[in-house]
Image (cartoon, rainbow, N blue to C red):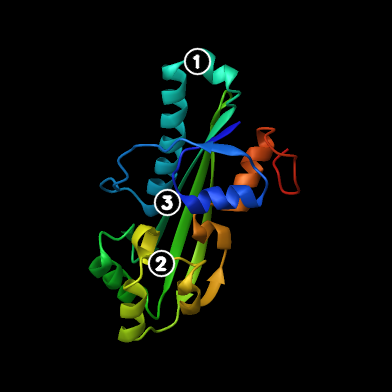
């Protein structure tokens, strides 16, 4: 059984999309960026910390029960939106979401989505980096979007799979990565661990 160290319904949806059964046990870590840490270093550190923390918590609670429940691995993930080396996490409120949307309007930004798998072999990770171009948005469009609940629990204050799809002029990279779980990279890690059938592109 795979454990997903995230309460994100989008990550659950994406794992279900590829037929991976799992149980949710959210991680509880400090997700703030450290001083002098690059965006890439930050997102990789966080995904690894989430997977490792939940694995260690399950082991500490009862290693025998862990074995009996057939938990074989923990999957951690982290996704950030970056513009001008600034991380745009989940907005605090609608005003913050509006400020983020204005910052992204008419510009290209990066979405970094990292995934880590912790099992008896140790901790492995992979990283997807996508570029997303927003068209110029009017003040009314920004206000209307931010008046909904959609931006509030999304990195960067938008959901590519929701109404914000209307804003995206161009995407280079991974659609699922922008949603929050890069399926190509996730599939390779799961195949390497024997949790899904090996697929093209899996490491030998």
64 over 124 or under it: above or below = above
* Residue 185 shows in this picture: no
Mark 3 element type: helix
Q: In this view, does 17 lie to the left or right of 138?
A: right
Q: In which quarter of the image is the N terminus?
A: top right
Quadrant of res 44: top left
Give the percent coordinates (x, y) of residue 204: 73, 38
Cα separation, mark 3 vs mark 1, equals 33 Å
Q: Are marks 1 and 2 in contact (CB under 8 Å)?
A: no
* Residue furthest out toward the front: 148
Q: Residues within 10 Å of mark 2 (few under 14, many from 20)?
A: many
Residue holding disc 1: 63
Q: In this view, does 116 lie to the left or right of 184?
A: left
**Which of pointers 3 and 2 indicates the residue nearer the eye?**
2
Mark 2 element type: loop
Residue at left offset 41%, top offset 48%: 43
Q: Which of marks 3 and 2 is nearer the N terminus?
A: 3
Give the percent coordinates (x, y) of residue 55: 47, 27
168 over 30 or under it: above or below = below
Cα separation, mark 3 vs mark 2, equals 20 Å
Q: Is residue 89 left or right of residue 123?
A: left
Quadrant of res 98: bottom left
**Which of pointers 3 and 1 indicates the residue nearer the eye?**
1
Give the percent coordinates (x, y) of residue 155: 39, 59
Residue holding disc 3: 40
Q: In this view, does 22 lie to the left or right of 8?
A: right
Q: Earlier in the sequence, mark 1 or mark 2?
A: 1
Cα separation, mark 1 vs mark 2, equals 40 Å
Q: Earlier in the sequence, mark 3 or mark 1?
A: 3
Residue holding disc 2: 158
Q: Which mark is residue 144?
A: none
């Amino acid at each position: 059984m795979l454990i997903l160290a995230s309460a994100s319904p989008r990550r659950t949806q994406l794992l279900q999309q590829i037929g991976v059964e799992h149980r949710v046990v959210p991680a509880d870590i400090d997700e703030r960026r450290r001083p002098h840490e690059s965006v890439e270093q930050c997102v990789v550190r966080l995904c690894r910390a989430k997977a490792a923390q939940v694995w260690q918590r399950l082991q500490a609670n009862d290693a025998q029960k862990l074995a009996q429940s057939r938990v074989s691995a923990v999957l951690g993930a982290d996704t950030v939106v970056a513009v001008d080396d600034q991380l745009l996490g989940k907005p605090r409120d609608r005003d913050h979401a509006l400020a983020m949307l204005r910052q992204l309007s008419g510009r290209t930004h990066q979405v970094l989505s990292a995934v880590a798998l912790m099992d008896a072999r140790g901790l492995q990770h992979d990283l997807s980096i996508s570029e997303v171009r927003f068209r110029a948005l009017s003040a009314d469009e920004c206000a209307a979007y931010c008046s909904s609940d959609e931006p509030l629990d999304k990195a960067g204050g938008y959901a590519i799979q929701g109404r914000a799809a209307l804003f995206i002029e161009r995407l280079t990279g991974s659609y699922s990565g922008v949603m929050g779980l890069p399926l190509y990279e996730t599939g390779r890690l799961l195949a390497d661990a024997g949790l899904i059938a090996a697929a093209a592109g899996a490491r030998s």
